[in-house]
Image: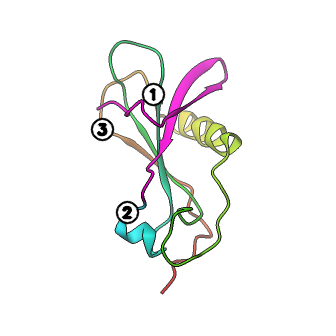
Amino acid sequence: MALNTKGSRRITVDGMEYRWRIRRKPSYMQGLCWTPITYAVEAASGGQPGTILIVIGGQAHPSNWVGVETEPVRPAHVAASIRQARGQGWDPDQAGSPFQLDRSAGFVARP
């Protein structure tokens, strides 16, 4: 499965180029601030799609429906997530199921 290139951003981490993307509209659960934001990362180079990294962030989606203020996902956060996932065994060049990285420690769901 490949990441949609429209709306994705490029980032270079440790000499390798990646693309990352946040879903523009929040899911129902994210819109109500019941679950944190998620974003996807994949290797930008190569002809065949590899394993996608799904990062579960620690803040609400910026387009949530209940007006909870949130900080944007910055490239530095994405780079740190990529390094952490690589350290835990994510190989973006290998085909396979999505690799999930949970960085949601401290997220408090809204009632």
Secondary structure at badge 1 equals: loop
Q: Indicate the position of residue 38 as horizontal and vertical percent values.
A: 47, 54
Identify the image's colour scheme: rainbow, by chain, secondary structure or one colour: rainbow
Q: Indicate the position of residue 16 as horizontal and vertical percent values.
A: 59, 19
- Mark sitting earlier along the chain (3/1): 1
Amino acid carrying mark 1 in the image: Asp
- Total label count? 3
Mark-to-mark CA distance, 3 and 1: 11 Å
Residue that mark 2 sits on: 27
Give the left or right position of residue 107, taking residue 91 as reference. right
- Mark sitting earlier along the chain (2/1): 2
**Residue beneath the point at 43% across and 50% down:** 23
**Farthest residue in the bottom direction?**
111
**Residue beneath the point at 44% across and 27% down:** 92
The segment highlighted magenta reads 1-25
**Farthest residue in the right direction?**
76
- Dot 2 and dot 3 residues touching (CB under 8 Å): no
Q: Indicate the position of residue 28 as horizontal and vertical percent values.
A: 36, 69
Instruction: Answer with the quarter of the image where residue 84 lies.
Output: top right
Q: Residues within 10 Å of mark 3 (few under 14, many from 20)?
A: few
Residue 83 on the magenta segment: no
Residue 21 on the magenta segment: yes
- Dot 3 and dot 1 residues touching (CB under 8 Å): no
Mark-to-mark CA distance, 2 and 3: 21 Å
Residue that mark 1 sits on: 91
Give the left or right position of residue 94, taking residue 24 as reference. left
Residue that mark 3 sits on: 97
Secondary structure at badge 3 equals: loop
The residue nearer to you, when weighing 3 against 54, is 3
Q: Using the image, determine if residue 36 lies above or below residue 81.
A: below
Amino acid carrying mark 2 in the image: Ser
